[in-house]
Amino acid sequence: MIGNELRDLLEPTIERLGYELADLEVRLGGRGGLVRVTIDRPEGIDLNDCQKVSHAVSALLDVADPVPDQYDLEVTSPGLDRKLTKIEHFQRFEGEVVKVKMRFPIAGRRRFRGTLLSSNDENIVVEVDGESHSLPLAKIDTARLVPGGA
C-alpha cells in the first residue's frame, strides 16, 4: 500500500511545480530500496527539471518520512519507450505503436503490439495485424510506447 500512499503525498507537490507524476516505482528491502519518480510535461523534461523535482520531493520525504527502509530517490523523465499508466496517457498517444502485456490472456494471448486506436475509462483498442483487440485497462500488466513505431 505504500505506493498509493506515496503517490498521494507526492503528486500535489509535483503538480504545483508544473509537472505530471507520470509513474512511481517503489522497491524496498534487500540491499537498498528505490523510489523512482517519473515526471513529465508537454514541453518535455530536462536535467534541471529532474533536479528541481528531486529537491522538492527529497525535502517532503525527509519531513513526512513515509518510507520505513533506506532507499535511493531517483527522478527521471519517461523516455522514448515511456510507460502508459493513466487513461490520459493512452488518450494522448492514440495513433502511436504500443506494446501491451496483459495479466491474463485475452483472445488466447497476453502480449499485443500494434497501433493504439482508441481508449476510454474501461478499455483500449489496439490494432494488431489488421485486427482490433479491445483490452480492459484493469487487466493490463504493462503498456509502453514503441519508439519510432518500430
Image: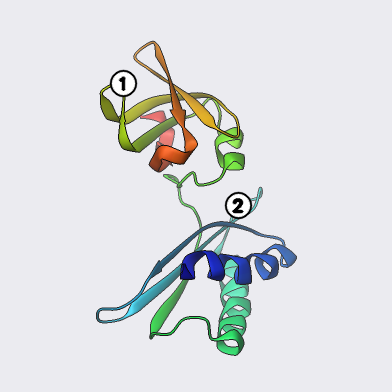
On screen, 66 above or below 98?
below
Examine the image and state in which quarter residue 97 appears: top left
Secondary structure under the numbered disc 1 in the rendered image:
loop
- The percent position of residue 38, horizontal first and vertical second, equals 51, 60
Task: Kindly identify the residue that appears in the image at 47 percent across and 81 percent down.
Answer: 67
On screen, 23 above or below 17?
above
Residues tagged 1 and 2 counted as in contact (Cβ below 8 A): no
Residue at the spot of label 2: 44
Q: Residue furthest right?
A: 16
- 126 horizontally vs 63: left or right: left
Secondary structure under the numbered disc 2 in the rendered image:
loop
Task: Kindly identify the residue that appears in the image at 74 percent across and 66 percent down.
Answer: 16
On screen, 3 above or below 71?
above
- The percent position of residue 70, horizontal first and vertical second, equals 38, 86
Residue at the spot of label 1: 107
Instruction: Residue type at mark 1: give it.
Output: Ala
Instruction: Residue type at mark 2: give it.
Output: Gly
Looking at the picture, tell me which residue is in the foreground, 93 or 28: 28
- The percent position of residue 55, horizontal first and vertical second, equals 60, 80
**Alpha carbon separation for disc pair 1 and 2:** 36 Å
- 50 horizontally vs 128: left or right: right
Examine the image and state in which quarter residue 62 appears: bottom right
